[in-house]
Amino acid sequence: MRRAISSWEPYTRGLLRMILAFTFSLHGYRHLFGLFHVAGGRRAAVPMALDGLPAVFGSLEIVGGFLLFVGLFTRPAAVILCTELLVAYLYSAAPLGLWPIRNGGNEVLLYFLAFLYLANAGGGALTMDGLFEKRRAKVTA
């Protein structure tokens, strides 16, 4: 049973990568184009740490989200986005206090940990990186 479940791990990692990339890129569209306004329940709370970054970071979020979604340069893109998220936390959330639930850093820390995992483990199944790797293996064989 355990072997059957673990055989699906690359596919679940690929699904995780695609969902995270899509939702993360939405932050970029809000930064650059003003789309997807902050939800009503969040207005009274401390703003999310990503919202405290300058708008130019929106292009990084859109391009990085696209690269992660298709699985192209997955590990380097995840490292770059991890760096952006760390900067967002230190720049916007950390000065407001220690606890992420009170300083708006919850989502940023979750994205950071998920992208750190992808930087370490790779993109999983259904990636452009994997497709290029298979083609390279056929050419050298």
Image: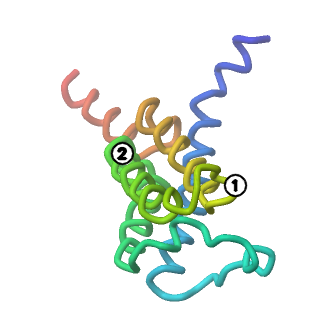
Q: Is residue 64 above or below residue 136?
A: below
Label number found at residue 75 = none
Q: Position of residue 116 (x, y in %)?
A: 46, 39
In the picture shown, does residue 55 fall above or below 106?
below
Q: Residues within 10 Å of mark 2 (few under 14, many from 20)?
A: some
In the image, 133 versus 51, the foreground residue is 51
Q: Few, some or many C-alpha atoms within 10 Å of disc 1 (few <14, some 14-19, many ≥20)?
A: few
Quick one: quadrant of the C terminus? top left
Tell me the kind of residue under disc 2.
Val
The residue at the point 62 percent across, 62 percent down is 104
Q: For residue 35, which quarter of the picture?
A: bottom right
According to the picture, the residue beneath numbered tag 2 turns out to be 79
Residue visible at 54% across and 71% down in the picture: 27
Question: Between 65 and 48, which is closer to the camera in this rendering?
Answer: 48
Q: Residue at x 48, y 56 (%)?
A: 89
Q: Is residue 140 above or below residue 44?
A: above
User: Residue 11 or 64: which is nearer the viewer?
Assistant: 64
Which of marks 1 and 2 precedes in the sequence? 2
Q: Are marks 2 and 1 in contact (CB under 8 Å)?
A: no
Q: Position of residue 48 (x, y in %)?
A: 60, 67
**Cα–Cα span, label 2 and label 1:** 24 Å
In this orientation, which residue lies closer to the viewer: 126 or 64? 64
Q: Residue at x 68, y 59 (%)?
A: 102
130 horizontally vs 35: left or right: left
Q: Is residue 29 left or right of residue 67?
A: right
Badge 1 element:
helix
Q: Which residue is mark 1?
A: 101
Residue type (three-letter) at the residue carrying disc 1: Ile
Instruction: Say which quarter of the image contains residue 63.
Output: bottom left
- SS at circle 2: helix
